[in-house]
Amino acid sequence: MKKMKRILSAALALILTLVLVTPAFAAGQDTNKSGTITINNAEPGKTYKAYRLFDLSYDGKGHYGYTVNEAWVKFFTEDAEGKALVNIDETNGNVTLKDNTEQGMQNLASKAKSYAETNTIPAVKEYTTQANEKKVTFANLPLGYYMTTTNAGGLYALDTTNPNTEMFEKNTKPTINKSADKTNAAYGEIVNYEIPFTIGGYIWGDYIITDIMTGLDMTDEQVKNVKISLNNQNISESYTVKYDKNSPKAGANTLKVTIPAETLKKYTSGTKLVLKYAAVAKKTVSMDNKVSMEYNNGPNKTEKTPEYEVKVANYEFVVKKTDEDDKVLDGAVFGLYTDAACTEQNRMKFIKTENKYRLAEKNENGVADIVAGQVTIEGLAAGTYYLKEISAPDGYNKLIKPVKIVITENRNAEGTSAFDNLGNRIDPTITMNDGQINKVGNEFILKIINKTGTELPSTGGIGTTIFYAVGSVLILAAVIVLMIKKRKEH
């Protein structure tokens, strides 16, 4: 693209000076030279044609003389649209363009192509690409100012063979994609994103990348560190970054990156650049991203790439504290740890809302005690956790050992996401002490059962109690006998 534009700019600048040049370049001129046009980034299965609009007299020393090609005389001298595009010197037939801007040249090419199709103007060369063929070379072309067309779309190229020139497929549309460095993330965890995008065949204006995040947020520092790279090296050219919270709706944050046309034009068609940024997971169950890119595909013709979505999951489970009859017991206190020894520095903290405990971020003042009953612990990444009972309800014994809980992520058939093709999160596999927990309704319920018993016998055992009872009976019998004897005496 750079080479083409340098050649084109030089050629057009010279054209303007040629109005004052005599037509001939007489002595020493070689009018039998031939040239080539090479089209890069050609699309397979498309037909490419080269039309010689103007004949060229070129001395190899920077002198160009253009005259209308015989096949195009009627278009440029009689057709109203064609006449409006060029200036033709009445004395020597020298041709210059009335509008030598990029839009002016595309206007010329568009009208010339339409005229060629309507009036069956033959192409100098024609070629249909085969599968996987990405380059077309038209060789042995008479020197001239050529229009190349393709049935791939609506953009066309103009350039001079002097003697050789390189063009790029103008119809190639920019593409965009997206990936994250993880498929599941805990609440508050940083997720790194990459958005690769390619440069299209023709730059008519800025590229605007819009990334709408649901359940993700960016710090001021993260916004400052949004970068665009080429081959893992940050580019130095300018672009602008804008971050809007709660846009376009509450809970949805929008990152918008604008790459100016001046920056894009420094790269050839097909070049892949990568937009990189980091964001913080701020939601349970699912964090969603939808990215697309707006670009111009002609004068005042705005197009948009297909939207590309990336989702990141996190997980939850229910802790249900019960007795042996499955009755919920309130008042037990648990801690959730990331190590088997349940050390205090590895005890997780949570934000409590009613009967839910959401994993706290590092900068949040969370609580370490999980008080059950029946509560939901949410915002967890896949991994291994240990649930330790700190204290049991009155009348019940606490667990001697921590409960080992393993959350295993399950992915789609392609292995690329924790969500199915409809966007629904795929259930994880959850085990408790190596036994799999089956889902009940919409919940994975981990039952923690406490046991209780009857009152133990007091000191002395049941034998002593019997002696006390028998002794009491004997004393009572003696009292009765004594009372009866005294009555008889009276």
Image (spheres, grey):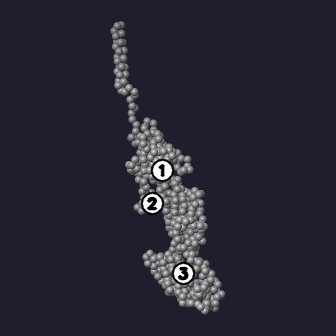
- Is residue 302 shown to the viewer in this render? no
SS at mark 2 in the image: loop
Report, in whole angstroms, how far the alpha carbon at label 3 lies from the one at label 2: 46 Å
Check the image and report above or below for 472 versus 457: above
SS at mark 3 in the image: strand
Query: Looking at this view, is 420 or 139 the one in front?
Result: 139
Task: Tell me the amino acid under the disc marked 2.
Answer: Ser
Sequence-wise, the earlier of marks 2 and 1 is 1
Q: In the image, is 287 to the left or to the right of 413?
A: right
Query: Looking at this view, is 93 or 159 the one in front?
Result: 159
SS at mark 1 in the image: strand
Q: Which mark is residue 378?
A: 1
Residue 36 at x, y percent in the picture = 52, 83
- Badges 3 and 1: C-beta atoms under 8 Å apart? no
Task: Tell me the amino acid under the disc marked 3.
Answer: Thr
Q: Nearer the viewer, mark 3 or mark 1?
A: 3
Q: Residue under circle 2?
A: 417
Q: Nearer the viewer, mark 3 or mark 2?
A: 3
Give the total number of marks visible in the rendering: 3
Q: Residue under circle 3?
A: 165
Q: Quadrant of the N terminus?
A: bottom right
Report, in whole angstroms, how far the alpha carbon at label 2 lies from the one at label 1: 20 Å
